[in-house]
Amino acid sequence: MKKLVIICLTLCTFNVFAQDNTESFSNNDPGFKYRASFPAIILANIGEGGQRTNTQHIELHVKRELDSKNIIGVKFATWRLFQPMGIQWWDGLLDKIDSETEFYPGYLRETGIGISYQRMLWKGLFASVEVLPQYKTYLDLNDKKIANGFKLYTSYHLGYHIAFGKKKRIFIEPQIHCQNWMFDTNTPEAFKQLDNKWKSYFLFEPNLYVGIKF
């Protein structure tokens, strides 16, 4: 719950800053064709150690601007799930984390390298899509491997690019995204019983990306 409050407050704060960000994206220094970024939410895992709900989330994006409107990139991500990802906000997601009623009998580690496409729509407003093939590893509570599998994870984003500094090299991208997973193989029965109770997608996740151009 604390993480959600922090994210929401941060997004609201940067939304106010965005009102003053009237410079067009196309006016940024054309010399910086590359950028690297990460979601700020991963910082919330630092210091949690072996806590049951620590997702151990690591994610990095490296992108290249083809022109002022089109950006392509490579995404690396790994995280550890302690309950099904398809539990929606209106299904009582936060309550289920507190009650631990939908926790897996272990963990699901997902790791992958994928691609992304970002389209600038108007000034800093953008839409993007990411495709991330993932290698799955199922673990028990003692971190002993149970099984391996594959998942194709896709996400769809709507956000705002806000650049800072004289050369506009530092930037943030508050955004909302939705994700789904069309292929999900070799899930152990105990995990599958929980997954089947929920959706194969998640809607309206707020996030904030922080990055630098080079």
Image (tube, helix red, strand yellow):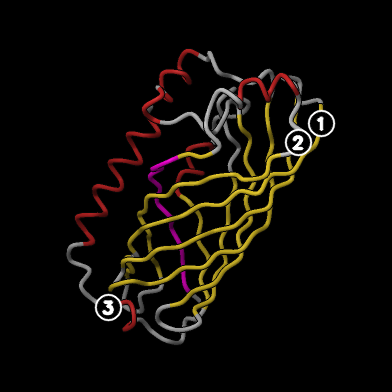
What kind of element bears circle 2? strand
Please name the residue that numbered disc 3 is placed on: 24
Amino acid beneath label 3: Ser
Query: Tags 2 and 3 in contact by the CB under 8 Å rule?
Result: no
Horizontal relation, residue 96 to residue 147: left or right: left
Within 10 angstroms of label 2, few (less than 14), some, or many (20 or more) residues? many
- In the rendered structure, which segment of residues is drawn in magenta? 203-213
Residue at x 31%, y 69% (from the top left corner): 124
Horizontal relation, residue 190 to residue 71: left or right: right
Residue 7 vertical position relative to residue 124 in the rendered view, above or below: above
Indicate the position of residue 112 as horizontal and vertical percent values. 69, 51
What kind of element bears circle 1? strand
The numbered disc on residue 176 is: none
Residue 98 vertical position relative to residue 84 in the rendered view, above or below: above
Query: Tags 3 and 1 in contact by the CB under 8 Å rule?
Result: no
How far is mark 2 from mark 3, CA to CA?
44 Å
Front label number (3 vs 1):
1
Indicate the position of residue 149 as horizontal and vertical percent values. 77, 39
Amino acid beneath label 1: Ala
Q: Earlier in the sequence, mark 3 or mark 1?
A: 3
Residue at x 63%, y 56% (from the top left corner): 76
Residue 148 vertical position relative to residue 105 in the rendered view, above or below: below
Query: Tags 1 and 2 in contact by the CB under 8 Å rule?
Result: yes
Residue at x 50%, y 60% (from the top left corner): 129
Q: Is residue 211 magenta?
A: yes
Please name the residue that numbered disc 2 is placed on: 137
Please name the residue that numbered disc 1 is placed on: 147
